[in-house]
Amino acid sequence: MSGLKIPYLKQLTSAGSMDAAELLMSNGALIRIDKINWADFPAIIDTSAYTGYSKDYLWIHYVVRNETIRAVCRQDQEPVWQDSCVEFFLKQGDNYRNFEFNCLGVCLSANGP
C-alpha cells in the first residue's frame, strides 16, 4: 500500500453518513482489500475502503459485497470478529490501536504491542 495518499476533504463534517459516504466514494482514496492473512478463512470477499480526513477525523467508508453475512453483536466491545466484519489499525509509537466493525456499526477497539 506504499504511496497511498489520503486526501484532506474539508467538506467532511458530522454530516449524515450517506453524505459522507457519497463524498468519500467520489473524492476519497480507494483501497482495494484483496489479501487474506488467515489460513482458516481463505475466501476473498469483494471489499474496498474509501478514505479521507478532515480537521478532526479520519474517515473510512467500507464497501463489502458478499452473498451471506453474520451480524449478531449489537453492543460496542462485543466480539465482532465472530460476525462479518472489517478492521483497521493505527500505529501509535510502538503500539497500535485496532478497530473492528460489523455491518451494524458495532465497534470493538483495543490497543496492542
Image (cartoon, rainbow, N blue to C red):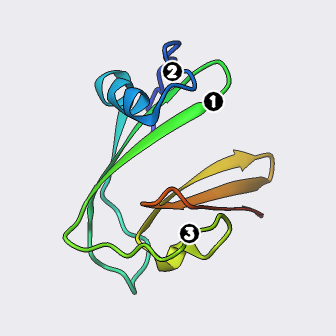
Which element carries disc 2, helix, strand or loop? loop
Farthest residue in the left direction? Answer: 67
Residue 110 percent coordinates (x, y): 73, 63
- Residue 3: quadrant of the picture: top left
The crowding category of the residue bearing disc 1, from other C-alpha atoms within 10 Å (few below 14, some 14 to 19, many at least 20), is few
The crowding category of the residue bearing disc 2, from other C-alpha atoms within 10 Å (few below 14, some 14 to 19, many at least 20), is many
Q: For this view, does 42 lie left or right of residue 82?
A: left
**Residue of label 2:** 12
Q: For this view, does 113 lie left or right of residue 88?
A: right
* C-alpha separation, residue under disc 2 versus residue under disc 3: 27 Å
Residue 7 percent coordinates (x, y): 47, 21
**Residue of label 3:** 74
Q: Which mark is residue 69?
A: none
**Closer to the camera, 74 or 65?**
74
Type of amino acid at the residue the image marks with label 2: Leu
Give the vertical position of 16 relative to 95 (above or below): above
**Closer to the camera, 110 or 4?**
110
Type of amino acid at the residue the image marks with label 1: Tyr
**In which quadrant will I find the C terminus?**
bottom right
* C-alpha separation, residue under disc 1 versus residue under disc 2: 9 Å
Farthest residue in the bottom direction? Answer: 40
Q: Which mark is residue 57?
A: 1
Q: Earlier in the sequence, mark 1 or mark 2?
A: 2
Type of amino acid at the residue the image marks with label 3: Arg
Q: For this view, does 111 lie left or right of residue 32?
A: right
Do labels 1 and 2 touch, CB within 8 Å? Answer: yes
Residue lying at 23% horizontally and 66% vertically, measured from the top left: 66
Q: For this view, does 75 lie left or right of residue 62?
A: right
Give the vertical position of 85 relative to 54 (above or below): below
**In which quadrant will I find the N terminus?**
top left
Give the vertical position of 27 relative to 61 (above or below): above
Of tags 2 and 3, the one toward the viewer is: 3
